[in-house]
Image (cartoon, grey):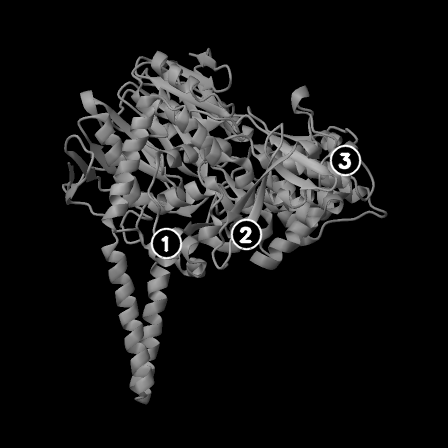
Amino acid sequence: MLRLFGLAGAIFVVLLLAALATGAPVLHALALLTGLAAAAALAGLQLSRPQGRGTVRMDGLRAPAAVRRDEGGAPHIAAENWHDLFQAQGFVAAQERLWQMEVARRTAAGRLAELCGESCLERDRFMRALGLYRLAERALADCPDEVRACLEAYADGVNAFIRAGKLPPEFALARLRPEPWRAVDSLAVAKLLAFELAPPVADVVVRARVAQVAGPEMAAALYAPGPSDASPPDPQQLPDLGGLCRLAMWAPQTVSGGTAWALAGTRTESGLPIAGCSLETAPRAPSPLHPLTLHGPGGARLEGIALAGLPGLLVGQSRHFAWALAPSEGGTARLVPEPSEGVRSQLTAIRVRGRAEPVAHTVLIGHSGPVVAMDESGAAALRSPVLQPGQEVAALLGINLARSYEEFRDAVREWAVPGLTVIYAGVDGTVARLETGPELREEVNPEDGIALGGRPADAAARIREVAASRTGWTLPFLARLPGDTVNMQARNLLQPLLQTLQEGLRQGARPESLTELEKRALLLLSDWSHEEPAGSAGACLWERWYFDLVEAIFRPRLGLTLFNQFIMTPSGQGAAEQLILRALRGEESPWLPLEGEFGLPRLALSAFRRAVAYLAARQGRSPERWAWGREHRVRFRHSLAEALPALGPLADLGPHPLGGGPATLHRSGLDPTMSGTVTTATTYCRLVDLARPGEPVAVLAPGTGGHPLDPSFAAQLLPWLRGDLLPPRPTGEDVLRLVP
């Protein structure tokens, strides 16, 4: 945002100086118009800032409620009953995140192209096929009365803000008046959350496409066999999946990954549990997550993070326990060949920004599920546990209202869809791990005192390794854990690959040696600690070498487009790593022979040479001065740029050098087509010691505020980049009173 107004100011100064120098009336007029336009834009932005004090009358409230914001910008809402508390939360959520709520419900409904144009048309077609919004409508019909009342109260609060007319600036840029928020919209956001937390559909689609391109035998040699009911179908029975594989490149709108954990009192200095979590989202400004404290009836107090569009908190703590959510490996989807004669069709229309007429689209539904691809050779239906009506909101609200572990467990049971791990840490010392599904699986007070869940496996393994290394943990020591950048993949692969590289020098048609630059780079990598801070030269070389090696193995057989999609999927990343590990153990594979120009030793050598040459060209011929953060950068996409893409280069935050990577606890996902651009990152981290429940530490990138002129909008970006967690801030004196 500073860039945007800085550019306007620079243009104004240039025009003014030119006008003064030449005396041309046209330049005087242009300078005046530029200055007035910038002033008007700034004034308009100022007027759209959320109201932080005063009185707002709100229909439906049963008693007055109050909203205060702490010095970090996080709202604290107090109400005398749960209905009013959720209605006030809806009002505050709309103040801070109405655009994010609008984008989320449109994503779930397949209506994103109305905002973003042609670029989102394929995504809308896919989401219409999935039918998440239809599932939300069915869930609303089965919703318990008390849950429906909470959803309607939340919607009433959102709509009270919309009716007030003081909308966020994104709506003015998009020339959009939001439709009233409905209870079903929150259910659709919850279903979208469940879908994005589940193992990615892109995994099974890209895996099937690899079988179509490289052959079933090659795919079987690459991917580890799964359960018998999840075995891939015969690729000859499926339609061409090339177009559908593009979904591997789509950024999530809610939460796509993360870890959750709790240490029992036997491992802490205080004798009570310490709980923590990290949530992975696409880097956006503002985040779809929203820090919040709710003060309810009977002394109830909930503190943590909410997801825009959902009542209650997603993760956080009450007076009785702390909890966190993370994805699990359960709930994998399947592609199922669908006989064409069994496919039902439904004609819909997708409105696209920039088009005068809507685009006709036919939704296809088979016996096994929604049909996501179809051509003359057949149809493919998607069978997924997520694509069933569920009570995700009932589960989340039940967690918020629970007062004991038994009530907590009963609430989690409502989330019947597999794919979610929930961690519990109680003030009575209980820690537990629960995994959702048709039958809830739970582990209470594990013997090692560590309750843990999350994806990817490398991150969870690192947490267990650190947690098990000692006892007597305190919050200040554990606060460094979410920012940990140890690369677990490099610890397994680096030394064997260095030895294989030396073997590659001997396997050539004639003996070879490294250049002086390559020797210096090799020495640098040999001494590397496996940590990946933004300034690490070793991390920079390792990540480039590993990517070039994987590309050399797979791109010749898959082609550039499918390779990029393959390496973006978790299953593709895991399959590539396991293939290299098997080759290092001496196991032959049709993808990777042990000898010859296409064997691992020669490919490792050529990939190393390409990596050194690439980095020397970009960062100079001094390897010790290379930095991972120059190749690994995060840009927080500003919501103003979603409404008007031309503003992106001026309004986005960044790019900033970022430590960590795909195989670290401080995790990020990379888009190989965008030269090191981070597509997802662990933007929210939180820890709390139940012995001191009023002193949690947390960080949310880029900040808590939802308005670009809010001082808290990007206030936590630099602490997050440093790996710092922040203590609670005092509550301010300004009060926004909500009255009936």
Above or below, 241 relative to 422: below
* C-alpha distance separating marks 3 and 2: 31 Å
Q: Is residue 38 left or right of residue 507?
A: left
Q: Earlier in the sequence, mark 3 or mark 2?
A: 3
Identify whether 447 is placed above or below 115: above
Mark drawn on residue 236: 3
Do the CB atoms of the residues marked 1 and 2 lie less than 8 Å apart?
Answer: no
Say which element carries label 2. Answer: strand
**In which quadrant is the C terminus drawn?**
top left
Residue 538 showing in the rendered view: no
Mark 1 vs mark 3, CA separation in Å: 46 Å
Q: Residue at x 63, y 49 (%)?
A: 520
Q: Is residue 729 visible?
A: yes
| Sequence-first disc among 1 and 3 | 1
Q: Which residue is mark 1?
A: 176
* CA neighbours of label 2 inside 10 A, class few (<14), some (14 to 19), many (20+): few
Q: What amino acid type should be assigned to the residue bearing mark 3?
A: Gln
Crowding at label 3, few (<14), some or many (≥20) Cα neighbours within 10 Å?
some
Residue 729 quadrant: top left
Looking at the rendered image, the disc whose residue lies closer to the viewer, 1 or 2, is: 2
List the residue tagged with mark 2: 359
Give SS at disc 1.
Answer: loop
Residue 189, given in percent of the width and then of the height, sits at 42, 36
Q: What amino acid is found at the position of numbered circle 2 in the picture?
A: Val
**Hey, which quadrant is residue 273 in on the image?**
top left
Q: Is residue 195 above or below residue 73?
A: above
Q: Quadrant of the N terminus?
A: bottom left
Query: Against 611, is 493 above or below?
Result: above
Residue 155 rendering spot, x and y as whole percentages: 30, 36
* Residue 311 position in % (x across, y down): 32, 32
